[in-house]
Image: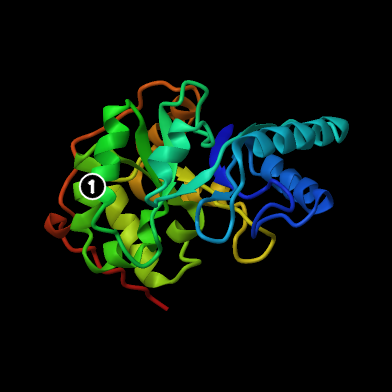
Amino acid sequence: MTLVDLHCHLLPAVDDGAQDVFNALSLAKVAVEQGISHLLLTPHHLDGKYINHKLEVIQKAAHLQDELNKMELSLQVFPSQEVHLNGELLEKIATDDVLFMDETNRYLLLELPHGDVPKYTEQIIFELVARNIRPVIAHPERNHAIQRDPSKLYELITLGCLTQLTCSSYLGNFGKQVQTLTEKIIKSNQGFVFASDAHNFEGRRFLMKEAFERLTAEEGSDVAARFQQNARNIINGEDIAELEIKDISALPPAKKKFWLF
């Protein structure tokens, strides 16, 4: 199983991810062990705490690739950003300080504020889509407003957004509520790709292998294959598979599991 990871914080000393090159290389070894062959370096950008300018990310990504090559690790890394939704976003794109998920500038990894979906979100997404940019919403299952009202995610997708679900969310590392919502997003065809969002060796780890094993067991090999192919297509700037999305509130209740001891 060869995987593409579209979201991780492996780039050293730029945000709350890897803190130095040694740490980054150690994490990279784990990524390779997970079956990851291509990986987007997505440091936080414009989130009120971190600013990682495009040219600096490109330079640091090239340096990290050199270090990976010296270690003979079979991992190709590419510069990108996890761009926070705010009023400056369109201006930063216009002034060429934003990195996309592909070289054609078609897909943008977009992070919503954790506690809200701001009122101006719809207008910014409209402007992005009008520029032929498709926002890929990072970890929507962890957004508090979407947790309270999942129809907000449905609305974002109908506007043209895609979604990136986090492997550790699907595996329950952020709690049962987040895990259940992640499952519902997948079952309603509102999930398009998995990514690790790996930061470290503790809570925010590379768990793509485990997530895909569970996805295959729970939803079938076709769904797992679609998620994997979608990730490859995004990094290549190509069309992805999109099924008819369903309203989460209309999903049948989950079947209860009974255990015999």
In the picture as drawn, the residue positioned furthest to the bottom comes out as 261
Q: Residue at (39%, 52%) from the top-left corner?
A: 86
Q: Residue at (68%, 38%) from the top-left corner?
A: 56
* Relative image position of residue 80 (x, y in whole percent): 57, 37
Res. 224 in view: no
Quadrant in which the C terminus appears: bottom left
* Position of residue 120 in the picture relative to residue 194 (left or right): left
* Relative image position of residue 61 (x, y in whole percent): 70, 36
Q: Quadrant of residue 29?
A: top right
Q: Which residue is mark 1?
A: 122
Q: Quadrant of residue 67?
A: top right
* Relative image position of residue 127 (x, y in whole percent): 28, 36
In the picture as drawn, the residue positioned furthest to the left comes out as 250
Q: Residue at (31%, 72%) from the top-left corner?
A: 258
Residue 48, placed above or below residue 52: below
Q: Residue at (55%, 42%) from the top-left corner?
A: 81
At label 1, which amino acid type do we have?
Glu
